[in-house]
Image (cartoon, rainbow, N blue to C red):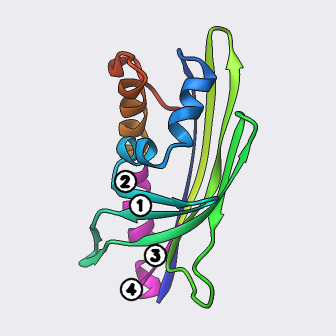
Amino acid sequence: MTTFSRRTVSEAEVPAPRRDIWAILTDPAKLASITPFVKAISADGDRWCWQMLGMSALGVKVAPAFNERMTFTDGTRIDFAPEPPDGTEGRAGATGRYQLSDAGEGTHLAIDITIEVELPLPRVSKRAVEKVMASMMERTGDRFARNLYEQLGLDPQKASTG
């Protein structure tokens, strides 16, 4: 098994109140509905299980499910990190944060995510797999922004990530 990882950082000014964005990001069903490649999110307190749709890269198909410890800070920050079930090691997970702050009449939303996955591929394939991961994460970020705007009742054509 080889571990592959990719990080993405994006920021945007969203023309919606912070409380409205917070309500979406802290609701497992709503967050799953706007996040591409996510089939469902189930929550058991601060431990959320993310169930992904199947993805394939270099002939390997994976449909991971992984547990994340979610830490919520007073309407301004959500931190998350892998927390596999007791006695097991996770083969996939994400570490990062959503950070929200007031920005004029809207909200500044900053997202920092590092995704790691173990795959039965040789180490020599690392560059190719991580290139695929980077491309998928970029498309996912764009679709996430459009979906968030739609969920907020905003024009999704005005969504942008950077």
Which label sits on residue 126?
A: 3
Q: Which residues are magenta?
A: 116-137
Locate residue 71 relative to residue 114 in the image: left or right: right
Q: Are marks 3 and 4 in contact (CB under 8 Å)?
A: no
Q: CA distance from mark 2 to mark 1?
A: 5 Å
Q: Going by the picture, which residue comes out furthest to the right? A: 74
Q: Does residue 35 sit above or below 18 in this rendering?
A: below
Mark whose residue sits in front, 3 or 2: 2
Observer-nearest of 93 and 118: 93
Question: Residue 34, position in %: x, y?
Answer: 38, 41
Q: Amino acid at mark 3?
A: Lys
Give the residue type that dot 1 points to. Answer: Met
* Precedes in sequence: disc 3 or disc 2: 3
- Magenta-drawn stretch contains 132: yes
Q: Residue at x 64, y 54 (%)?
A: 96
Along the polypeptide, which appears first: circle 4 or circle 2? 4
Packing grade of label 3 (10 A; few <14, some 14-19, many >=20) is some
The three-letter amino acid code for the residue at tag 4 is: Leu
Marks 2 and 1 in Cβ contact (< 8 Å): yes
Figure check: 44 above or below 92: above
The answer to whether residue 158 is above or below residue 85 is above
Which disc, if any, is residue 136?
Answer: 2
Q: How far separated are the C-alphas under marks 1 and 4?
A: 14 Å
The one nearer the camera, 47 or 10, is: 47
- In the rendered image, which residue does mark 4 sit on? 121
Residue at left offset 54%, top offset 69%: 67
The Cα–Cα distance between marks 4 and 2, rounded to whole angstroms, is 18 Å
Q: Which residue is mark 1?
A: 133
